[in-house]
Image (spheres, rainbow, N blue to C red):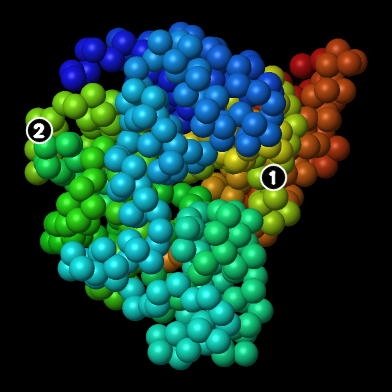
Amino acid sequence: MSELSLSRILVANRGEIAVRVVRACREMGIESVAVYSEPDRLAPHVVLADVTVPIGPARASESYLDGGKLIDAARLTGSQAIHPGYGFLAENAVFASDVLAAGLIFIGPPPEAIEAMGEKTRARALMRDAGVPVIPGSEWVATEEEARQAANEVGFPVMLKAVAGGGGKGMRVVSEPDELASAFTRARSEAEQAFGDPRVYLERFLDRPRHIEIQVLADRLGNAVHLGERECSIQRRHQKLIEEAPAPVVDAELRDRMGRVALEAVRAVGYESAGTVEFLYVEGEFFFLEMNTRLQVEHPVTEMVTGVDIVQEQIRLAAGEPLGWEPDPAWPIGHSIECRISGEDPVNGFLPSVGRIRELEPPGGPGVRWDSGVSTGFDVGPHYDPLLAKLIVHAGDRDQAIARMRRALLELHVAGVRTTQPFHIAVMGEADFHEGRISIRYVEDHPELLAGVEEELLDAATIAAVLLEEERHGAPMIPIRPLGPTEDGQLSGWQRAFRPGAADWKAGG
């Protein structure tokens, strides 16, 4: 089947990734079908799509996680394929099988590959058999006593991980033997709640490794390529916050070596479509972590340094097209950084922030990309992942990319919900980040990053109150708390414009 025979694709997701897929479809001349829950009825992905179908209430289990409803919507609208995006059912082998059984195309890998890489202990065994370096660890352990025996064999410190896991769920670091019992109980409980599977296994805990992943593409004819690496080390509780390509620590020789290993992993499971092979890197060595059998949140940074539209390639590959091209030896071209703009409060432990987005002014200018799933007037609720948008920049080198990201972050203005914007501004000015001295413990190692965030958020709230009061009275007012000159570097352009002494900030001015 050629891509031209795909005339309509249902996007089984929401938010910025649904918008991303809808845009890719439009550029390819393919109609898109958006599904939406009740609170998402006016969301950007719904507004942009060619056809829309309501699928139920806010609760994800009754809407976006109901595979039967999604397949019914595809049939109802005459869609030939379903794109799952990421999250929800994107890595659900049963859903992929059901899509195929319904006579539809699943835009992703075969169900067998999803299943093989979704169970972590099985994936480790497959990778070990394929010659891929794997972190020393155990099979799944059923009891505390089995866990203790495995930990003694692997050696402390160890990490407990969910067999069916991902996204940091069901993970616990155990430094000493007397910590094992409670950590084992908590990890099993969290794994059960998150995945419906309480099984856990152990791996040797690597202290302050870097998280580096390789983007791969593979067709059904056995052709596979990699598009280089991404650095995803800046995380909080195993949730990525900032990504970049290329990785500061990776040179051409290491990139080639990691790429070849990633392709061995692809071939070991008969993989097709876009995917990501993730590694932990420490002191010149790298170890297989997991394979994500879907599109990654951070795929834009790879697109920026290669020029490859990964979503369109996914669609082509699902339609049976061969890859038909080889990686450019000049890749990576320049440097790209992505900051995840989430509705979270950095001061209050990154807890979700809900409310209505009263104002939204995204940044622009050279080398700036704004992938968003929200707009002014959008209600950010508690039902879904707090990711609102992704801010991506591209520049000639890493220093230029950092400067461009900082500039773009200072231009961004979001009112109505708290976001991770001030945290990202702080990181862009931090010395270790500038020098590329990062690891998965970066946030914990730099508590000072959040020291000035609370004050900045209070400033923003004060300014918003002043503007509302001004609107009521029809004349500008003096802000309640003047901002000191040393705070300028952490303010957005919008905040700085309304500080005392700024142009036009005078009564009647």
The single residue placed furthest to the right in the displayed view is: 473
Q: Which residue is mark 2?
A: 325
For the N terminus, the quadrant is: top left
Q: Residue at x 55, y 24 (%)?
A: 69
Choose top left, top right, bottom left or bottom right for residue 103.
top left
- Relative vertical location of residue 234 with respect to residue 418 in this rendering, above or below: below
In percent of width and height, residue 401 lies at 36, 43
In percent of width and height, residue 383 lies at 68, 37
Choose top left, top right, bottom left or bottom right for residue 285.
bottom left
Q: Which residue is mark 1?
A: 352
For the C terminus, the quadrant is: top right
In percent of width and height, residue 96 lies at 39, 36
User: In the image, what residue type sits under mark 2?
Assistant: Trp
- Relative vertical location of residue 118 with respect to residue 307 in this rendering, above or below: below
Q: Nearer the viewer, residue 94 or 204?
A: 94
Choose top left, top right, bottom left or bottom right for residue 472.
top right
21 left or right of 245 in image = right
Q: Nearer the viewer, residue 105 or 461?
A: 105
The single residue placed furthest to the front in the displayed view is: 101
Tell me if mark 2 has few (under 14), some (14-19) or many (20+) residues whose alpha carbon lies within 10 angstroms of its own: few
Please say whether residue 124 is visible from this viewpoint. yes
User: In the image, what residue type sits under mark 1?
Assistant: Pro
Q: Residue at x 53, y 75 (%)?
A: 142
329 left or right of 245 in image = left
First in residue order: circle 2 vs circle 1: 2
Please say whether residue 366 is visible from this viewpoint. no
Give how far apart the Cα atoms at labels 2 and 1 are. Answer: 43 Å
Q: Residue at x 22, y 37 (%)?
A: 306
In percent of width and height, residue 84 lies at 43, 32
Figure label count: 2
Q: Nearer the viewer, residue 247 or 224?
A: 224
